[in-house]
Image (cartoon, rainbow, N blue to C red):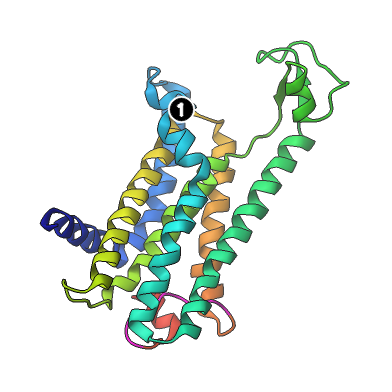
Amino acid sequence: MDHLERCAWFLRGTLVRAAVRRYLPWALVTFMLMGSVLKELSPLPESYLSNKRNVLNMYFVKVAWAWTFSLLLPFIALTTYQLTGKPRLVLQRLTTLLVGTAIWYGCTTFFHNVEHYTGNCYGSPALEGLRREHRSKQQCHGAGGFWHGFDISGHSFLLTFCALMIVEEMAVLHGVKTRREQRLHAAITSLVIALGALTFLWVLMFLCTAVYFHDFAQKVFGTLFGLLGWYGTYGFWYLKAFSPGLPPQSSGFSSKRDNYKK
């Protein structure tokens, strides 16, 4: 248990810092740009992480929103109730997950449509043998073809959005005070460790995406949508009165704008 406590202490001391929330977006943009340049000019050798069927990609990244949603749900509920004691405010803050789900669904649907309307079916990855009879990706793949369109990086979008959302929500830990003998303490400690590990994993896999996958423009647009989803909510809408609000920093809600500046 002491090992878990030390791990949670480290993560709390790292991820709840205002500097992390301030500089993580810039770090992700830097990783995307540098990784993309490296991919174009001096590609890294093939590795386990460059295989799309690696365990981290198949069972974590492809369902990144499900992992983020399932861990933030109890975390937001427990921490908000511990700070405010008001079920109404717990429900209000949990609507951030509904907003996040809408952003995830809307963006991924848009990406799919862009790839569909800008794509064509070819006989091979070398873009030889145009097959005009297949007008959708599903038909093309079903006929053994290769669909080529502008494939905005869903990984770049989702990993950016999820990582930034987690660190925003973990800011609440500044005000959470629990005793070690409480069950609530054990629950929050476990969630802090899980969310911290998930954040580091999302950043790692974002870097792998930058280095190994997609064209430069596809990653730029994917990252941009992730940043817009984060800033449009936590940097703008959640500062307003009619919104899910930002994570509370102490008992009761302080000024939303002051909370964000912290």
Magenta-colored stretch includes residue 25: no
Residue depicted at x 59% and y 83%: 242
> Could you say which quadrant of the image residue 203 lies in?
top left
At which x and y percent is residue 36?
46, 32
**Residue beneath disc 1:** 212
Q: In this view, does 256 lie to the left or right of 250?
A: right
Residue depicted at x 71% and y 15%: 127
| Viewer-side residue, 79 vs 104 | 79
Crowd tier of the residue under label 1, counting other residues whose Cα lies within 10 Å: few below 14, some 14–19, many 20 or above: many
Secondary structure state at the residue bearing disc 1? helix
- Please name the amino acid that badge 1 sits on: Tyr
Q: Can residue 35 be seen in this view?
A: no
At which x and y percent is residue 216?
54, 34
Residue depicted at x 46% and y 57%: 70
Question: Which range is magenta?
Answer: 243-251
At which x and y percent is residue 60?
45, 41
Q: In this view, does 253 lie above or below 27?
A: below
Magenta span: chief secondary structure: loop
> Could you say which quadrant of the image residue 137 lies in?
top right
Q: In which quarter of the image is the C terminus?
A: bottom left
Magenta-colored stretch includes residue 244: yes
Q: Is residue 210 above or below residue 140?
A: below
